[in-house]
Image (cartoon, grey):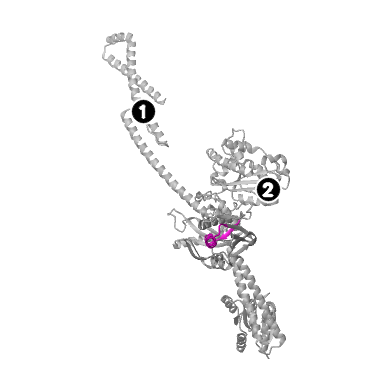
Amino acid sequence: MKMERRLLLFIAAAGLALALWIGLTLVLVGATLENEERQTVAGLLAPRLALLLLSWALALALVAAVLQILFKRYRVAPARLLEQTRVLLTAQLPQQLTPEGPPELRWLAQSINELASQRDALRADMAQRIAAANLDVQQEKNRLAALMAELTQAVVVCNLEGRILLYNSRARLQFRALSQAPMLADGAELMGIGRSIYAVFEQQLVAHALENIQLRIARGAASPSTQFVTTTRTGQLLRVQMAPVRAVDTSVSAAAGINGFVLMLDNVTRAYEEETLRDQLLHGLTERSRSSLANMQAAVDMLAYPDLDAPLRERFLGVVRDEVSAMSHRIVELAQRTTQDLKTRWPLEEILGTDLLAAAQRRIEAHCQRPVTLAEPCAELWLRVDSFSLLQALAYLGHRLVDEFEVKYLQLRLRAVQGRAQLDLIWSGHTVSSETVMTWEMASMQFGSEGTPLTVRDVVERHGGEMWFERERVRHEAFFRFLLPLANAQEQIEAGQATHDQGRPEFYDFDLFQASDESRALDERPLSSLTLTVFDTETTGLNPSLGDEIIQIGAVRIVNGKLRRGECFDQLVNPARLIPQATIPIHGITQDMVQGQLAIGAVLPAFYAFAQDTVLVAHNAAFDMKFLQLKEDSTGLVFRQPVLDTLLLSALVHPQQESHRLEAIAERFNIAVRARHTALGDAMVTAEVLLRLLPLLAEMGIHTLGEARLASQKTYYARLKY
Amino acid sequence: MSQKILIADDEPNIVVSLEYLLKREGYAVLIARDGEEALEAISREKPDLVLLDVMMPKKTGFEVCQAVRASELLQNTKILMLTAKGRDTDIAKGLALGANAYMTKPFSTRELVQKVADMLGALP
């Protein structure tokens, strides 16, 4: 448009110039003529004025045509090229110009195209390298996480602020043992991505250890790690080894170049208790025996005096008798206690009874070429054994039975009796003499291709156990019975959990190495960097002030913009009142389900710990908060955290939508609803809704917690009173 | 006048022997059955020597020893510690707190008598 007007202006100017030119010519011609001649010419020209005008118009048309062509060539075409080039500049994908216009412009366009393709090639190359590098990094991270997951030692990685970036499942178990509410929060209130390690260890302790490490780095130590032992709030004794995570950025000075630390945890409570017991026993054996011996020796010395009268002699003899019996007593007691726990120094592994039996079955069948059956299904039973040598012993005994007594088939049986496992190797028919058993027991196990200097007796002693041969005349059976140690309860849980825990690498977030704005006021922090506790409650009704109570709390964490499905809180609560029949279809929680559950007074502290240091999020948060607030007086727990409400945020982002019910929003965002109307299920959905809302809020210029809270307050829904 | 010895030990089984032994040797023998009793007896009777057991109820031998050495009146009392604690750290502690000598249980009574005689003979 602008061009056209400019062209018209040019043409008009040209017309004017042409008219002037003709006028000037006429004036010049007129000036050379006499008066009469001038009139003659005027008289000649006047009637042909139209012709003159026509000629002017023709000339003008010609000029206009030329002008237009020139304009197109030298004004419009470059302008178009410029526009296209601009597009090219901002293009994200490879793109080319179409050369057009005069040759010079085409050459220019071609050069621009070449530049553009160079840039695109570079860009593609760079993208490829970045992708490859990212893949490498991701693979390394996954490898690391996988490695951590397999480790039987508890490992936790923290950034300098003590926030947890990574932990493995062993650490999770370890922390469960430390949790004050293990049945409720499952240790998740202590162990979670982004949580503070200082909930478990004193900050000064960790700071002191870090200082030690920094000193060592400054001294140039090659592997500057340190170690400390601490008791936790639950009275557990932890041995902690700490190693620094060094910053890759070498521009920072070596001493300051730590950006996190790795903790390796060992719960040494039991080892320590055993050690203490050992100490006590040793003490009892030495000091108390010394006293007794002293008493006896003195008495015996006195008895040696020939001039002793009868009553005194009797008295000294009494001392000797007395002390002898006290010492015998002590030794019996000592022997009992040591055989219970302390005898085994050989490192034993925990193994599930059925696994051990299955392995033994395979092993004996392979060696003896005889069928081996299991006498009875054994209950869930965990043993502490050195399975390799134990299987060897079983196979060896089986081999000798088959070899020397032609036993046709064998049987295995495992039971727990009086705190010990009884493992029987049973056969029927021939009985074996005790002498034979003795030689088998004491001979080193040489059979088939296997040879080991170990004897069956060695294997038994390694387990602090016993082995003997027994006959069951009624059933014509005989068996070797091994007494073996059972794993203690704690170990059983741990070992069991370790095998059932499939969840691998949801356990890390290295982005937290970068995050260090904890100190900044929460309101100024970007929503995506916050640690959030998204929760939901199920209640007996809608009126907390009229006696309705919470019957279920579910919560899940979002850390650094990522949903942490593994770190959740899910707990039924006994409301100490009847659940109205009419509400049961809504939440699906019956009176039977809450019977025997903990009351809110016991559950809230655990939830409080779980939600500590985070921002609370709920759908229609005011409702849930009301229930929590009404418990403030009785529990003394005040939830002071900032609160975000997905209902308000949704209304903010989609003001035109009619419904902001959770289902409606979930449907809008195409979120799969798995367990609607359980507290945890709803909390999960709410969390996913929030994660979808965040980018939409960012588009509206709402980035920080403060902005989100302010904007929520202004929505229509916020003005409604609940 | 015969020299006075206090036996401070809570085990009657050793006291009976020591009492007989020392009386035979011609000493006057007093007996205390715990730490407090021992301290009272020392300040009341001012014995020349105390056979002090370490592990006693109420006050340990270490405490008694310290109290005696801290008192101007009593600090010249000879102390022979008798104990079932055989660790050299305990011996070091006993001597550091002011015991003149230390015997680890069990001991031969002849050695004990010899030691007592040596310690009292050294008295000015």
- Image position of A566 with respect to A407: above or below: above
Q: Same chain for the residues at labels 1 and 2, yes or no? A: yes
Q: In the image, what residue occupies the spot 46% across and 48% down?
A: A139
The amino acid on which the numbered mark 1 sits, given as a three-letter code, is Ala
| Viewer-side residue, B114 vs A319 | A319
Looking at the rendered structure, which numbered label has been put on residue A573?
2
Q: Is residue A233 visible?
A: no
Which chain letter matches label 1?
Answer: A
Q: Amino acid at mark 2?
A: Val
- SS assignment for the magenta stretch, majority: helix
Say few, some or many: other residues with alpha carbon within 10 Å of mark 2 (under 14 / 14 to 19 / 20 or more). Answer: many
Front-most of residues A690 and A326: A326
A433 versus A599 height, above or below: below
Q: How many marks?
A: 2
Q: Position of residue A237 (x, y in %)?
A: 59, 61
Residue holding disc 1: A77
* Quarter occupied by residue A722: top right
Which region shows up in magenta? A381-410
Magenta stretch encompasses residue A510: no
Badge 1 marks a residue whose secondary structure is helix
Q: CA distance from mark 1 to mark 2?
A: 77 Å
Q: Position of residue A213 (x, y in %)?
A: 49, 61
Residue A403 covered by magenta stretch:
yes
Q: Secondary structure at mark 2?
A: loop
The residue mark sitting in front, 1 or 2, is: 2
Tell me residue A504's x, y (percent): 53, 49
First-in-chain label (1 vs 2): 1
Using residue A69 as the reference point, say whether residue A439 is left or right of it: right
Name the chain under label 2. A
